[in-house]
Image: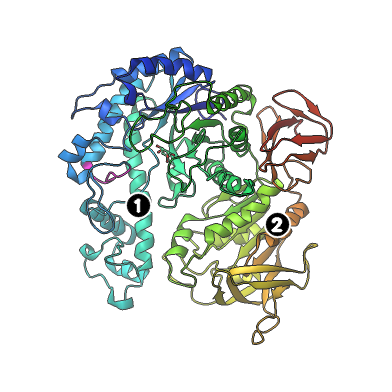
């Protein structure tokens, strides 16, 4: 399954020729230099609106046409952006209503970017008009392979137009104010609405305590962003419905429910900026796993490969400390992106700006304008590697394990007041579940409540605070059919309106499914710990483990107790369970009541995978800091990627001879890995 009409791995960058229109010498050099960097695509026009429409209604597309033509003549394809991510000043000045109003209800001044009102009919019309111009002129250009819609869609607007649209959206959702008042529990503190006009989005100056309102506002922001997006793509689809569209996502950004946005995309792409080299000992494991987790999330969104739309070839300019990727590291990070499902490596940006906010951001071409720099050479090396990887393009990553991470539940659990206001840690817990899979080289999807569970043998449900739709029924069905479910504390406490379930929880039958009952939650201050003591090992495990943050007290009601809390508090009963197991139908449910240390999860989850026959990318013990992942190509070739995230040399004992895909060298049983080294191996399909 290819992502674009150009069936090759993409290698390219954000290219902003509009900054260089007065420097034709630079524009001429660009093409030659891009070819030397082994690039085959450029993302063009992302912030070019004032060059494309310098005054209202006066469109200047010729310069862009010239660029797209010249790129194409030189074998470089265009990912064509719509420019809505930054609005021209003439437009902000003439139509102040297109400027965003913040949660304090203050309208922003002109400037910056990513700050338009997504409801404003004027802005929507302007976007539609420029997109129509672009689509009419370039929508069927043979050099254009993908639409890049806006840039990193984000944020919210509280202007009167958005507020009115919110009220209309609520009217459709609830029908009557009575229904809304009931769903939002507004009798509390006398917040009953008696007229629709009284409803305003949450604000630090106003309402923050009506959680149903907070949740619906976030849902509305996603809805309105998607509707803005639909307005953007309508003129594009009208010209050429075949040309795919993408939007570039940001790692674990939670202002929008990406699952909903993804339904409008043909291709998912994301911008990967881990804080590389932030660890004194040079161990990059914890930076790498965050990036790979989001790659796996992106891969799970549409169940197919995705694009890395941006990463820096060297350093950013916005992290606390902007360290450049060290020698050889760029190749390793690229291999890891590919390993987790990327069909491209693209950069921000091709050429460093001379002025303004990003003049010190890393780029392939720096101000020195030389191709003999280390960064350029390493980028060209990655390009050369990608040229050999046509067979990987479109290759899939079948996963038998998944982690459920639901954005709406995430919003709700973080908006709730209590039990731990300094950070409930649901995302950390999800990542802690992901880590053992990643370290062992077991591919895991990251999915949400609406997604189909039937492909999985193991489903982890960490802190699914809010239950919506028919998720509880489907979880029960998953178990009855033989699935293994691992649930944790703080699951199933509220319904889709953030109203607490009455009766036993986890609600909607999940307590009975797990064979336990929630009693109370005991959050811990940072630095405090409790002990989880194994009384009956489901697998060979350590005698005890540490727990932190949130320790829930539960009663076993049918489930076997596998671990209890340590008896450090003389007042606490000594048989309080913190890990249970319940057999239901052909399946099994584990319930983890405490927020466990990482080792606990790996000691539990990996043996579960083994017992279920869930295979690793490589049947080998991986030393610390070495990870592996696999993808299977259409012709059955199994690509195995092995990455060393440390500054030390490592070796891996291979289960069978494997071939280095790039060099053709066969490793019989020992695979040597250089410091920060990565290898792409192949073996026959299993
Ligand atoms: C991204 C953005 C780019 C550029 C980059 C710098 O978030 O999409 O336009 O600003 O950051 O790292």
Q: Describe the element under mark 2 as helix, strand or loop.
A: helix
Q: Is residue 50 above or below residue 262?
A: above
Give the x, y percent position of residue 154.
Answer: 37, 46
Give the x, y percent position of residue 294.
Answer: 54, 46
Q: Residue at x 61, y 57 (%)?
A: 432
Residue where numbered disc 2 is placed:
602
Q: Is residue 375 left or right of residue 624?
A: left
Q: Is residue 174 above or below residue 617?
A: below
Q: Is residue 212 left or right of residue 483?
A: left
Q: Nearer the viewer, residue 120 or 230?
A: 120
Tag 1 near tag 2, CB within 8 Å: no
- State the quadrant of the C terminus: top right
Residue 391 appears in the rendering: yes
Q: Describe the element under mark 1 as helix, strand or loop.
A: helix
Q: Which residues are magenta?
A: 114-121
Q: Is residue 482 left or right of residue 180?
A: right
- State the quadrant of the N terminus: top right
Point out which mark residue 221 bears: 1
Q: CA gap, disc 1 to disc 2?
A: 37 Å
Q: Residue at x 55, y 66 (%)?
A: 491
Give the x, y percent position of residue 34.
Answer: 48, 20
- Is the CB of mark 2 within 8 Å of ligand 1? no
| In front: label 1 or label 2 | 2
Q: Is residue 480 above or below residue 392?
A: below
Residue 24, located in which quarter of the rendered image? top left
Q: Residue at x 60, y 33 (%)?
A: 327
């Amino acid at each position: 399954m290819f992502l674009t009409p150009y069936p090759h791995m993409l290698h390219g960058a954000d290219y902003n020729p509009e900054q260089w229109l007065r420097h034709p010498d630079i524009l001429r050099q660009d093409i030659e230099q891009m070819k030397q960097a082994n690039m085959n695509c450029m993302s063009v026009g992302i912030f070019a609106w004032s060059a494309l429409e310098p005054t209202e209604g006066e469109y200047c597309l010729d310069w862009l046409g010239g660029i797209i033509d010249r790129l194409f003549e030189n074998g470089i394809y265009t990912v064509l952006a719509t420019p809505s991510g930054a609005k021209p000043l003439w437009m902000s000045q003439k139509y102040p209503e297109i400027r965003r109003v913040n949660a304090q209800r203050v309208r922003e001044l002109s400037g910056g970017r990513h700050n338009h009102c997504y409801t404003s009919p004027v802005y929507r019309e302007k976007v539609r008009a420029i997109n129509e111009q672009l689509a009419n002129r370039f929508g069927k250009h043979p050099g254009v392979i993908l639409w890049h819609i806006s840039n990193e869609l984000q944020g919210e607007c509280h202007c009167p137009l958005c507020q009115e649209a919110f009220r209309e959206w609520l009217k459709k959702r609830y029908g009557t104010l009575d229904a809304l008042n009931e769903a939002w529990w507004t009798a509390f503190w006398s917040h009953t609405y008696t007229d629709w006009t009284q409803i305003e989005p949450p604000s630090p100056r106003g309402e923050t305590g009506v959680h149903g309102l907070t949740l619906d506002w976030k849902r509305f922001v996603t809805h309105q962003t998607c509707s803005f997006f639909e307005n953007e793509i309508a003129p594009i689809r009208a010209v050429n419905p075949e040309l795919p569209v993408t939007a570039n996502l940001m790692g674990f950004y939670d202002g929008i429910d990406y699952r909903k946005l993804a339904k409008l995309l043909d291709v998912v792409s994301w911008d990967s900026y881990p804080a590389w080299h932030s660890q004194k000992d040079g161990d990059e494991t914890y930076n790498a796993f965050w990036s790979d987790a989001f790659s796996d999330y992106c891969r799970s969104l549409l169940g197919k490969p995705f694009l890395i739309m941006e990463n820096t070839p060297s350093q950013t300019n916005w992290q606390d400390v902007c360290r450049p990727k060290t020698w050889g590291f760029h190749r390793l990070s690229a291999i890891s992106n590919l390993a987790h499902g990327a069909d491209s490596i693209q950069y921000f940006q091709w050429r460093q700006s001379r002025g303004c906010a990003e003049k010190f951001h890393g780029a392939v071409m720096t101000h020195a304008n030389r191709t003999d720099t280390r960064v350029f050479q390493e980028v060209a090396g990655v390009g050369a590697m990608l040229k050999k990887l046509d067979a990987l393009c479109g290759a899939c990553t079948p996963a038998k394990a998944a982690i459920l991470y639901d954005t709406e539940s995430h919003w709700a659990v973080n908006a709730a007041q209590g039990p731990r206001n300094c950070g409930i840690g649901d995302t950390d817990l999800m990542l802690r579940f992901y880590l053992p899979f990643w370290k062992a080289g077991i591919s895991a999807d990251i999915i949400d409540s609406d997604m189909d569970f039937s492909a999985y043998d193991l489903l982890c449900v960490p802190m699914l605070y809010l239950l919506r739709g028919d998720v509880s029924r489907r979880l029960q069905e998953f178990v009855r059919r033989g699935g293994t479910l691992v649930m944790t504390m703080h699951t199933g406490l509220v319904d889709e309106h953030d109203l607490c379930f009455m009766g036993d929880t986890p609600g909607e039958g999940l307590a009975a499914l797990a064979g336990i009952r929630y009693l109370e939650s005991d959050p811990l201050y940072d630095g405090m710990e409790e002990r989880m003591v194994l009384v009956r090992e489901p697998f060979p495990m350590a005698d005890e483990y540490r727990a932190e943050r949130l320790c829930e007290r539960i009663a076993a009601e049918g489930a076997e107790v596998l671990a209890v809390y340590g008896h450090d508090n003389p007042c606490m009963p000594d048989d309080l369970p913190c890990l249970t197991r319940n057999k239901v139908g052909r399946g099994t449910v584990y319930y983890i009541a405490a927020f466990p240390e990482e080792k606990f999860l790996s000691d539990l989850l990996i043996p579960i995978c083994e017992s279920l026959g869930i295979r690793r990318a490589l049947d080998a013990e991986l030393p610390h800091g070495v990870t592996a992942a696999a993808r299977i190509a259409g012709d059955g070739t199994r690509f195995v990627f092995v990455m060393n995230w440390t500054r030390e040399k490592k070796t891996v004992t291979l289960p069978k001879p494997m071939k280095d895909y790039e060099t053709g060298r066969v490793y019989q049983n020992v695979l040597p890995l250089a410091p920060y080294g990565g290898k792409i191996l192949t073996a026959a399909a299993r």
